[in-house]
Image (cartoon, helix red, strand yellow):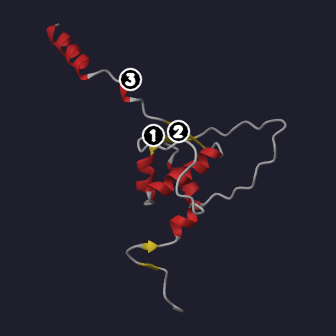
Amino acid sequence: MGGTAWYDDAAGPVVRPYALTGGRTHYDGDDFDLVALIAVADPPEPAEEALPATPWAPEPEHDMILELCRTPLSVAEIASDLELPLGVVRVLLGDLLDHSLIQVRRPAPVAQFPSERVLKEVIDGIRAL
C-alpha cells in the first residue's frame, strides 16, 4: 500500500473534515439554524483580572469563516462558500462562538409574522382607498 493516496481527485481528502472537527460531529451548544446569520463579533474588552485563556489554535477554516462573515452570512451560505459539509461548518461555528469571535442572529419565529388573513385584509383596505 506504499504509494496509494488516501483520496481521489473527485472526492478530495477523506480524512480532512473529521480532522477539522477533532472527531466531533455536532456542536454541544445551541443548534445553528440554516438561515441564522453569522457575523464577526466586536472584540471583547479585556477584563482586569481575566483568567488565562486556554490555548486554542484555530484552523485555517476558522479564519476563512471570520473573513467571510465580515458581512453577515447564513450558515448555509458559509457551508456553500467553503465547500464543506454543513455538520463540519456547524462545529467550526461553535468553536468561534465559544471564543466570542462571532455573533449569531437567529431568524424571527414564524409566529411573529402576520397571518395570511391579516395580510389580505390589509391589501383589501389599501385597495378600498
Q: Residues within 10 Å of mark 1 (few under 14, many from 20)?
A: some
Q: Residue at x 19, y 10 (%)?
A: 125
The mark lying in front, picked from 3 and 1, is 3
Numbered label attached to residue 106: none
Numbered label attached to residue 112: 3
Which of disc 2 and disc 3 is earlier in sequence?
Answer: 2
Q: Is there a contact, CB below 8 Å, between mark 1 and mark 2?
A: yes
Q: Residue 102 appears in which quarter of the rendering?
A: top right
In space, the residues marked 3 and 1 are separated at their CA atoms by 16 Å
Residue 57 in percent (x, y) is at: 68, 59
In space, the residues marked 1 and 2 are separated at their CA atoms by 7 Å
In space, the residues marked 3 and 2 are separated at their CA atoms by 19 Å
What residue does disc 2 label? 104
Question: How many marks overall?
Answer: 3
Q: Nearer the viewer, residue 21 or 82?
A: 21
Query: On screen, 112 above or below 79?
Result: above
What residue does disc 1 label? 36
Instruction: Name the residue furthest bottom.
Output: 2
Query: On screen, 44 above or below 11?
Result: above
**Dot 1 amino acid type:** Ala
Which of disc 2 and disc 1 is earlier in sequence?
Answer: 1
Q: Residue at x 52, y 44 (%)?
A: 70
Q: Residue at x 53, y 53 (%)?
A: 26
Q: Is there a contact, CB below 8 Å, between mark 3 and mark 2?
A: no
- Which secondary structure, mark 2? strand
